[in-house]
Amino acid sequence: MDPQEFRRKCALWCTGVSIVTTTDTKGKHCGLTLNSVASLSIDPPLMLICVDNNSETLDALLEKGFFCINVLSQDQEELAKRFCAQGDRFSGVALSTGLQGIPLIDGAIVSFECEVEDVHPGGDHKIVVGRLKNIVDGDTSREPLIFINGSYC
């Protein structure tokens, strides 16, 4: 299977866009844009995220044991792009502080605060299962940011 062909075909799948945030053990904010996010279970309340094995955010998330899934709205496309790029992703971003000192993205539609429950290998990613600890509502009347065919909409 050609990896680029696989990537092109997967791009046909419409996904929501979120920024997953955490802090490292020294308190530095870490985060990245993810579209591989899903609810896993209602009872108990579990979420899952899939993070590249080489991600600094993954390392921090596993050390801290807590993370937040911030679901973005359509007007937050620039934030989604920023958290895909290198550099200081948090500079100038409006934040609140959640459980365990985890940064929450202000203006997110909803933020799911999770404690790491389990981690599984997933090829070049880790599948991280988080137990939901808190939900922070934003403006749920706003439309979510969607990603399909390499574009936001």
Image (cartoon, grey):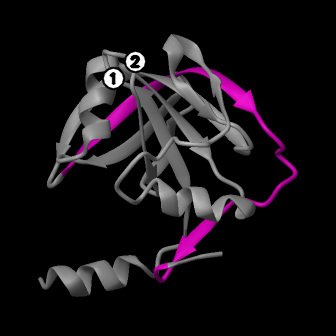
The residue singled out by tag 1 in the image is: 24
**Which residue is found at the position 55% from the left and 27% from the top?**
103
Residue type at the position of mark 1? Asp
Q: Is residue 130 magenta?
A: yes
Residue 110 vertical placement versus 100 (above, below): below
**Which residue is found at the position 61% from the left and 67% from the top?**
146
Q: Which mark is residue 149?
A: none
- Quadrant including the N terminus: bottom left
Image quarter for residue 76?
Answer: bottom right
Q: Position of residue 44 (x, y in %)?
A: 51, 21
- Quadrant including the C terminus: bottom right
Left or right: 36, with 110 as reference point: left
Left or right: 139, with 21 as reference point: right
Left or right: 23, with 104 as reference point: left
Q: Position of residue 78 (x, y in %)?
A: 60, 63
The reply to whether the C-beta atoms of the residues labelled 1 and 2 are less than 8 Å apart is yes
The residue singled out by tag 2 in the image is: 27
**Which residue is found at the position 83% from the left and 55% from the top?**
142
* Span highlighted in magenta in the image: 125-150
Residue type at the position of mark 2? Gly
Rounded to the nearest angstrom, the CA distance separating label 1 from label 2 is: 5 Å
Image quarter for residue 85?
Answer: bottom left
Residues 75 and 71: in front is 75
10 Å crowding of disc 2: few (<14), some (14-19), many (20+): few
